[in-house]
Structures are given as C-alpha cells and as structure tokens.
Amino acid sequence: MDRNYGKWFLTKVKKAIIDYGMIEKNDRIAVGISGGKDSSALLFILDVVRKYSPFKFEMLAVSVDMGWGMDYSPIQKYCNELNVPLEIVETKIGPLVLNVRQESNPCSLCSKMRRGALDSAAVKLGCNKVALAHHADDIMETLFLNLIFTGRFATFEPKTYLSRKNLTLIRPLIYLEEKTIKTIVGAKKLPVLENPCPVAGTTRRNDMKILLDDMENIYPKARSNILAAMKRKNFFI
C-alpha cells in the first residue's frame, strides 16, 4: 500500500491518539461496532493505523445485539476481510427499555446499558481499552444536549479511565467531522446496517444535529467556530 494512503484523514486520527496517549504498545483494544457508518469507519481506520504506523496493538470487534433481530452477517464478512475477530453480545436491551419500561427518553438508559454490556465484554475478552466511534460532530451535539436539557457546559472526554473495570475508553475520531466519516465510508464501500430501533431519527440527539445544520445554513462557519472555541478553552482537546 502507498505510504501516503489515507494521509488526509490519518493525520488527524494519529494526532488525537498522540495528544491523549490513547494507544500504547501491546494494548488489546475492543472496538465497539454498532453496524452504523461511524463504527465501520473506526474499525477500518484503526486497521490502517495498526498496519501503517508505529502504534502496535491488538484489536477485536465487539457488537452488542440490542434484541431487534439485526443481521450481522455483513459485519462478520467485513471483520473476516480485515482479519479481526468479532464477538456478538446477545441482549434484550432494546425491548426492555422501550416495551417493558416504556421510557419517555429511552436513549439515555439504552446507551448506558449498551455501554455496560460492551465494557463487560471487553474485560471478559482480556482487553484493556475500548474504542468508541464518537467524532467531532458528536462532541458538539453532546455539548448542546447538556446545555439545553441539563444546564451544564459539558461533553464527553477523548479518553476516560474506568477504575471499577480497569478499562480505558478512547475516542480516536474526535478530530474528524461527520462529513469526513461519510466520505471514507462511501469511498471504501464499508458496510452500514439499517438501524432497526423504532425511535431512530426521532431522538433529542437528532434534534441537535438539525439545530447545528440550521445554524450552519445561516452561518457556514458555525460548526468550525464552535470547535475552535472549544479548542481555545481546552474544553475537550
């Protein structure tokens, strides 16, 4: 492979890894794979990183089946092509949250339970780190969610240590915008599964995405300036 391959996005990913010491020698990383475009891109990018950079680590893919009957065969095929083991964790989290508990705001609880299942699987598989596919747009959406609904100026950290499980969460894509992720997925024809969740596209997070789109339509530099402001205040980087 050409050594300059992917330089246009790998530079930002490697900078994030270096800035936060996300990956160290002999790490065993569980990559969270939901079937969406972001996680498919994350697996592809980390595979390139481990092959064509000084970062030496093991990785495997972990998918938490939410109980909606999703077909993971495209993801299994994709992982086989990359020579990455895939572990599918069977749960009934989706029906439990929506049908049994009938949560009015299901996404928060669903996310916590899914993350708990992912983290537990990572520990069971002997991993010391979990890689999540959050990108720059996710950071802004989370910021606005907290501002509007909780009155807090906060978003997630690029790297978080979970002392109870002796596990570190890393987010190598934090310097990449969602439009870059879409470009990578389209160019490499990465698998993207349809989200079977009944509330997909109707959540508060989706509202924040629309809000940011509306802001950018009025002022084209809105997203880049919000990120720049967060950088200057060392808010998340």
Image (tube, rainbow, N blue to C red):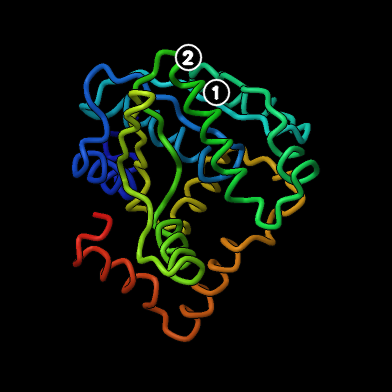
Q: Is residue 126 left or right of residue 160?
A: right
Residue 70 occupies quadrant: top right
Closer to the observer: label 1 or label 2? 2
* Vertical placement of residue 220 versus 158, above or below: below
Q: 199 or 163: nearer the eye?
A: 163
The label number, if any, that marks residue 173 in the structure image: none
Label 1, label 2: how many angstroms apart (C-alpha)? 20 Å
Q: Is residue 89 left or right of residue 118?
A: right
Q: Which residue is mark 2?
A: 124
x 71%, y 39%: residue: 94
Quick one: label 1 or label 2, which is nearer the N terminus? 1
x 45%, y 42%: residue: 133
Residue 193: percent from left, percent from top: 67, 40
Residue 53 occupies quadrant: top left
Residue sitting at the far bottom: 218
Q: Which residue is mark 1?
A: 79
Residue 152: percent from left, percent from top: 39, 65
Residue 150: percent from left, percent from top: 47, 65
x 61%, y 37%: residue: 35
Residue 74 occupies quadrant: top right
Q: Residue flagged by tag 1: what amino acid is it? A: Cys
Q: Quadrant of the N terminus?
A: top left
Q: Quadrant of the C terminus?
A: bottom left
